Amino acid sequence: MNRSKGGRHNMAHGRGPGKGAPMERPKHPGKTIARIFGYMGEYKVVLIFVVLAIFASVFGMLAGTAMLQSIIDDYITPLLQEYSAQRMAGFVRTLITMGVIFLFAAACTYFYNRVMLMVSTRALYRIRTELFEKMERLPIRYFDRHTHGELMSRYTNDTDTIREMLSNSVTNFISSGITIIGVFALMVYYSWQLTLLVLLMLVVMLSVIKKIGGKSGAYFMRQQAELGKVNGYIEEMIEGQKVVKVFCHEDAAKAEFHKRNEALCEAACNANTFANILMPIMMNLSNIHYAVTAVVGGVLAIVNVLTVGTVVAFLQLTRSFAQPVTQISQQFNTVLTALAGAERIFNLIDEQPETDDGYVTLVRGISHADGTFTEQPRGGDWFWRHPHKADGSVTYQKVEGAVEFDDVYFGYEENKTVLNGISLYANPGQKIAFVGSTGAGKTTITNLINRFYDVPDGKIRYDGININKIRKDDLRRSLSMVLQDTHLFTGTVLENIRYGRLEATDEEVKRAAVLANADAFIRHLPHGYETMLTADGANLSQGQRQLLAIARAAVADPPVLILDEATSSIDTRTERLIEKGMDSLMEGRTVFVIAHRLSTVRNADAILVLENGQIIERGNHEELIAQKGKYYQLYTGMFELS
């Protein structure tokens, strides 16, 4: 196999194309709709009552319109010619009956709208839950390919469009469909001649909806994509506002936002231009249709083909027929936008989750002299539990913390190798330091130890076990990592430290804080360990946030500790403060350190100098200084490492 950088076979991981890619038109709207309704499956009985209520509401409207014909022909016209008390009493009874029917129809309308609001809310609850649960199972490379704003848009904008469709558009479509069928049947009963005229105008209306609605839908989908980009940029600028101000990039940031906002504005204008002209056109067509029907109906009444009551009732039906067609045109864009959002959501839900074929697990327990083993959820030492399929036996191997890279090659993108033939061995309890410039591969090595990515070539072993055989959760539980970018969650100081091991007691959390030398400053906080942290710990200094992150790693009590530039954001005084605690924490553990400052790696058992994804020097501080190579140049030149 060719292992040169340019010609090497490599798997693509992570930072592929696709950030902010334009949204595609839904390819299978029917399947998307069916899938959306699948989330309402548990409400089948309720939905049956909703449909019945819609039928009752439409029936009430049709019955009231039919009674209008009777009121005119059987009561008003005769009463105008000759007054009759009996006929007047019948007229009043008919009016009361009509009022009751309309009230019943209104009650049914209120019922199905309220119920659909409840059902849509519960369906959105299930979608959001599934969306979040899937996000938690996605591999890291997915988040490398998509911006935060793009993902947030799925949780907010896209789910909101689905809510709008389920709570309003669905009932409107069903109601409109039933109304069109019922009104059409009644119109045919009253006058087939006028019905033909209505059908002719309906063809014109549907042609307009198809022409304009199709253009509007495409622009609405583009608008959603541009909105995701704008949201992502705003979030990025909010998080990096200090950096923007330090480098005086306010004008550049505003210019970039203006560019993105212009793209969103253009897409929104195009979408709403077509959407907004659709309604006036439909209203005017409806008015023209009404006028033509009135003229033709009047002629038919004059020649005694139809009665006046029939013409008036038919004109009312014409309005009732045009209204649902107009409603469908109004909801058309809402449905298209919802389908576009739903497809984006389902694309995320359908993403391949992080796979895990590991079967070796991590347990705590005690190994007895007779060779037996007792598992203990709390207390005892860490052991690898290794089941054997061949004979069904289980063996236990004590976790030592030995880590080995054997000729590892890796790249995030096709034909762009980041690590080239990395081989290293960390003995249990050793402190291994990585130094090198940005992009040398330091952080990538720690990512691979955690199996955030799998290596296409080479082997990584943990206590002699191929890490692909170790279940990912257990592998990561055996490691603690202080990330380069400290992140604190909304909650108390105690809860943030306990995040390293959720079952840790309060005393264990406080001991970890003491070990990291964080206890002193915590006790000076307004409420000590119960002090609430918000906005990623904005009420703490950068050094204090870093100390909490180190305490969080300490409470996990891991065999292997990874410090990814852990002290890069701490001043020299604070760094000295934690050194004693870190020395105690690192005792008996395998430690991998990546640091900006060479002073933090001087005491490492082994220092690996990386360049272009290769280890070009290795040894302890004195050995590397004696070699007078790259490390010597960095050290004597007082360079800070990136």
Image (cartoon, helix red, strand yellow):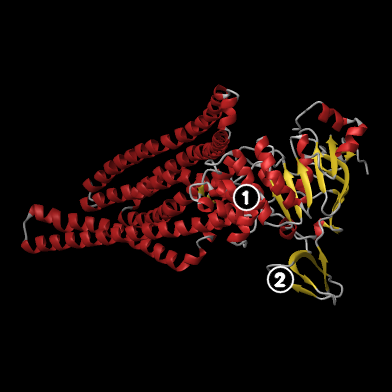
Give the distance between the C-alpha atoms of the residues marked 1 and 2, in whole angstroms: 39 Å
Question: Dot 1 lies on which element?
Answer: helix
Residue 348 badge = 1
Residue sitting at x 56%, y 30%: 260
Residue 498, position as x, y percentages in the image: 61, 56
Residue at point 37%, 38% (across, down): 285
Name the amino acid, label 1: Leu
Res 278 → quadrant: top left
Number of callouts: 2
Amino acid type, label 2: Gln
Locate the C terminus by quadrant: top right
The mark found on residue 376 in the picture is 2
Nearer to us in this view, 306 or 271: 271
Residue 329: x %, y % from top left: 43, 44
Q: Is residue 305 visible?
A: no
**In the visual, does 337 lie left or right of 550?**
left
